[in-house]
């Protein structure tokens, strides 16, 4: 039986920067962290890697979380350009908010870059898409009145 959505995983080259972004700006709670070395073949196999080493922090939110990885091994080449949301795969992370316009102003003032200002949909919902420090797409969404 599926109980619900639990988390999304994100890899970064700067763990502390990304943890601070989601903790400080989105009020996440870093509840677990650990590191592993190349000797942990069981974890590496489950990640689909022959060998790996790194650390992760789990940032919790009500009902779900973000698992943020920083790999020390394998050495990944310079990250490609910003990923387009139209490319198949993980498109974005969405945070539900009470007042989208206020959150947009607060996040933009804190340095978050948005694609455009919030848009009100015909159904009454309001949303905006922006980027985290690694270029991942983050949506803030105010649900329409019920």
Image (tube, helix red, strand yellow):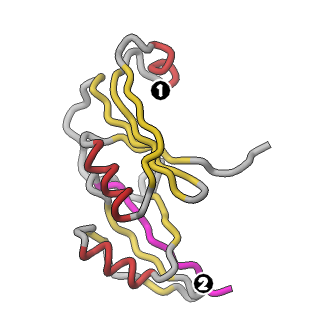
Mark number displayed over residue 14 = none
Q: Residue at x 35, y 65 (%)?
A: 25
Q: The magenta stretch spans which residues?
A: 135-146
Structural crowding at the residue carrying mark 1, measured as other residues with C-alpha within 10 Å and reported as few (<14), some (14–19) or many (≥20): few
For the residue pair 116 and 28, the one nearer the viewer reads as 28
- Asked if residue 101 is positioned above or below residue 33 in the image, the reply reads below
Residue 26: image quadrant is bottom left
Residue 116: image quadrant is bottom left
Rendered location of residue 117, percent (x, y): 34, 81
Give the secondary structure at mark 2: loop
Rendered location of residue 140, percent (x, y): 45, 71
For the residue pair 48 and 21, the one nearer the viewer reads as 21
Q: Residue at x 44, y 20 (%)?
A: 44
Q: Which residue is mark 2?
A: 144
Rendered location of residue 63, percent (x, y): 61, 56
The magenta stretch spans residue 141: yes
């Amino acid at each position: 039986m599926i109980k619900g959505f639990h988390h999304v995983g994100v890899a970064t080259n700067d763990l502390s920067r990304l943890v601070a972004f989601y903790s400080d700006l989105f009020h996440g709670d870093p509840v677990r962290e650990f590191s592993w070395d190349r000797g942990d073949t069981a974890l590496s196999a489950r990640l689909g890697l022959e060998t790996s080493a790194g650390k992760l922090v789990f940032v919790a939110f009500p009902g779900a979380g973000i698992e943020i990885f920083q790999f020390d091994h394998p050495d990944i080449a310079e990250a490609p350009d910003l990923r387009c949301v139209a490319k198949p795969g993980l498109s974005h992370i969405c945070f539900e908010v009470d007042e989208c316009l206020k959150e947009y102003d607060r996040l933009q003032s804190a340095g978050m870059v948005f694609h455009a200002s919030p848009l009100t949909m015909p159904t009454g919902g309001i949303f905006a898409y922006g980027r985290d420090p690694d270029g991942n797409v983050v949506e803030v969404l105010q649900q329409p009145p019920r």
